[in-house]
Image: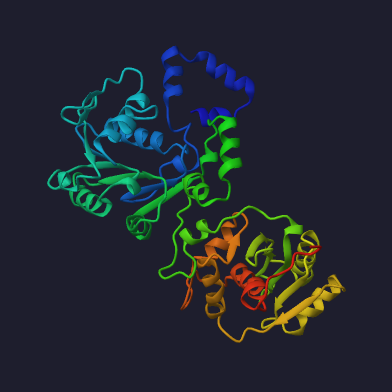
Amino acid sequence: MLRVLGKCAPEVRAAVWDQLSASDLRGLEEEWSWKAHGGQIEPAGGWRNWLILAGRGFGKTRTGAEWVLARARETPGTRIALIGGSLDEVAMIMIKGESGILACAQTGEKLAWRSTTGKLRFPGGAVATAYSGASPDRLRGPQHDFAWADEIAKWRYPDQTWDNLQMGLRLGNHARAIVTTTPKPIPLLGRLIADPETAVTGGRTFDNPHLPESFVAAMERTYAGSRLGRQELDGTLLGEAEGALWTRDVIEARRCAMPRREELARVVVGVDPPASEAGACGIVVCGLTGDGRGAVLADCSIAGARPEGWAARVAAAFAAWSADRVVAEVNNGGSMVETVLRTVAPGLPIRLVHASQGKAARAEPVAAAFETGRCLFAGCFPELEDELTALTPYGYVAGRSPDRADAMVWALTELVVNRPPGEPRVRGL
């Protein structure tokens, strides 16, 4: 009703509002459907499992609690499983938490929670039972109509617990489960996402309009772009290919502060031109530190640009970083690459390189340099890092070309892999 009123003229809304009784107003205030945002809205269709993959503070717990209450209201006598990382977490977060089931119950709904039995009883006769992801065998035998599984990435035995739950989720004609979790790269999440009977929604921490502005500002300032921020705030599942040349752990271990330009012996802009105008042009700026280590400084890559567009981006990156050279691959564009770069910036010092090996073979020496600490990341580069973790010795597994990764490899090959013996000299020293 509130959604409809929101589209009416102000005088119409006021007239309708004035005619509502106190109980009607309270009912509207407690109605969840008009408050839910984005990934909190139940998907349509015949799904069996609804996976909400979202950042902290997104409203996952509130959504799970409201979904359980709705099932209990519409199906008297139904049996519901509540599974968390531990029985204490089920009680303190899912049931008694600030956004838990008891807090979301409507006025007049009398729910009874008994910690001694681990059961929550609803007015219509529905019963929810608490289970722990650390005790999967407790789900052997019990049958349920519905289930709410919270933070499955924290469960001690996620696969065993989930499988036992699914085998007992067989009461009624439409047995279903809701899963609310912050993403972590565990096999169970991969299984769920790949299951055709799973509906996936979610979003970022910042999608919740009710969070304090000071909290949002602090989170963005501290964690924006980092691995922790992408996982815990953006709700992004950060995996890596099996046998990836770069792992997330190695990338995190090689973070460093941004060096000043005067601390760098050389700066190179690596360029991997697109094969077509619809493709992406990898443009990555890297520098050589005074102690001989390579550092990724900036990812200026651009997608869908005409040749003069990506060439202008290369020239801008060169100027912004007072670079010494542009290293550009010419396999795709041939002489056109040099022509378009010199047309946009005639004095640009360019080294053209030809790829005689595949991308993975070229990348391996650079990956080894990161593993040994001879190369670093001066900041966070989410899209570049996603490409690196999808690059294996046998090729790229993400389906498209790793343009950013290739540009970085060209730059660091110039600065580190092919660097002549001897210590670099910082300019002016």
Residue 303 can be seen, yes or no: no
The colour scheme is: rainbow
The residue closer to the viewer here, 176 or 7, is: 176
Query: Which residue is most to the bottom?
Result: 356
Image location of residue 258, percent across then percent down: 66, 54
The C terminus, quarter of image: bottom right
The residue closer to the viewer here, 321 or 231, is: 321
Q: Quadrant of residue 188?
A: bottom left
Q: Quadrant of residue 259?
A: bottom right
Give left or right: position of 276 versus 92.
Answer: right
The residue closer to the viewer here, 184 or 23, is: 184
Image location of residue 422, percent across then percent down: 67, 75
Image location of residue 184, percent across then percent down: 40, 52
Above or below 357: residue 326? above
Image location of residue 3, percent across then percent down: 52, 31
Q: How many marks?
A: 0
Q: Quadrant of residue 222?
A: top right
Residue drawn where x is 32% and y is 17% of the image: 108
Residue 99 can be seen, yes or no: yes
Above or below 401: residue 120? above
The residue closer to the viewer here, 10 or 157, is: 157
Give left or right: position of 71 versus 19.
Answer: left
Query: Which residue is most to the right?
Result: 346
Above or below 76: residue 41? below
